[in-house]
């Protein structure tokens, strides 16, 4: 991603979005998170919007600079989070490159405290909060999603009862990504448990290098 030009990212992004449109998708959220430097995260978000224009798909861009710790900051998560919540957010928000801000909260990634800090600042500069939550274990991210007023929380394979109840109470959308479970050989999220608790549930493909799924039909079939 760092090596690719913005034009190349837009071109290949448009090709992938065109495939999605051929399968019926007309609106797609596109997250950054594969550049992990200010200039590359901004490049990804601009390219995503351009890809939407080229393909005819409505693109909703989300800033996910806190996808993982950048290699330059290995062993220093706090310093990288400072970069994301500082320089990156200060660059992306005024330019209106994204509508939402996301963070991966899980063991080995970022903590609930990290997410609270980043998403509080993101809300203050006009970005809606989202969370990658409880995919690998119960990190408490589902509860935080409700506390912070997140529009959605993704994955939720290991969300606690308290977290599910909080999401239901505050109408946080649970986004389930069954193709990711298939690709990564992980358990599937218990969608029925979420629905029975009153959590509004959505499905996504989670198209990414690890989960090459452009088809919502496949995601729906796996969810069923």
Image: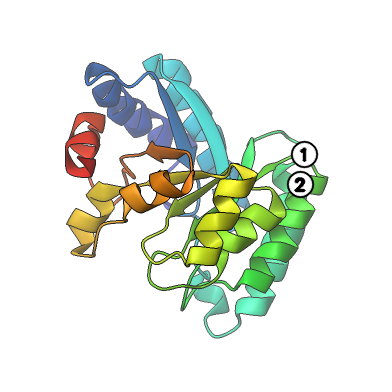
> Which quarter of the rendered picture does the C terminus lie within?
top left
- Is 162 placed above or below 219 here? below
Of residue 223 and residue 107, the one placed in the foreground of this image is 223
Where is residue 55? Give x, y as percent. 37, 17
Q: Which residue carries the number 2 mark?
A: 123
Local SS, label 1: loop
Q: Residue furthest right?
A: 124
Please report the residue visible at 59 percent of the width from the left and 73 percent of the height from the top.
111
Of residue 39 and residue 103, the one placed in the foreground of this image is 103
- Residue 103 shows in the view: no
Neighbour tally class for label 2: few under 14, some 14-19, many 20 plus, Cα within 10 Å: some
- Is 36 placed above or below 92 here? below
Label annotation for residue 50: none
Where is residue 36? Give x, y as percent. 54, 59
- Is 194 placed above or below 75 here? above
Q: Which residue carries the number 1 mark?
A: 126
Please report the residue visible at 40 percent of the width from the left and 14 percent of the height from the top.
56
């Amino acid at each position: 991603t760092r090596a690719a030009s913005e034009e190349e990212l837009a071109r290949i992004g448009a090709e992938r979005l065109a495939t999605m449109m051929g399968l019926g998708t007309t609106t797609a959220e596109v997250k950054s998170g594969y550049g992990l430097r200010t200039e590359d995260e901004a490049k990804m978000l601009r390219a995503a919007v351009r890809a939407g224009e080229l393909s005819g798909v409505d693109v909703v861009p989300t800033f996910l600079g806190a996808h993982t710790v950048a290699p330059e900051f290995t062993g220093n998560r706090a310093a990288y989070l400072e970069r994301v919540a500082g320089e990156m957010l200060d660059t992306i928000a005024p330019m209106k490159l994204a509508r939402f801000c996301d963070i991966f909260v899980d063991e080995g990634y970022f903590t609930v405290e990290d997410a609270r800090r980043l998403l509080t600042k993101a809300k203050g500069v006009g970005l809606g909060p989202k969370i990658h939550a409880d995919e690998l274990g119960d990190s408490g991210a589902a509860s935080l999603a409700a506390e912070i007023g997140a529009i959605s929380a993704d994955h939720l394979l290991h969300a606690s009862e308290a977290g599910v109840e909080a999401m239901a109470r505050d109408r946080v959308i649970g986004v389930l990504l069954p193709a990711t479970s298939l690709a990564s050989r992980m358990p599937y999220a218990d969608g029925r448990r979420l629905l029975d608790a009153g959590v509004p549930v959505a499905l996504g493909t989670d198209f990414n290098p690890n989960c090459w799924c452009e088809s919502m039909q496949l995601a729906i079939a796996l969810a069923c």
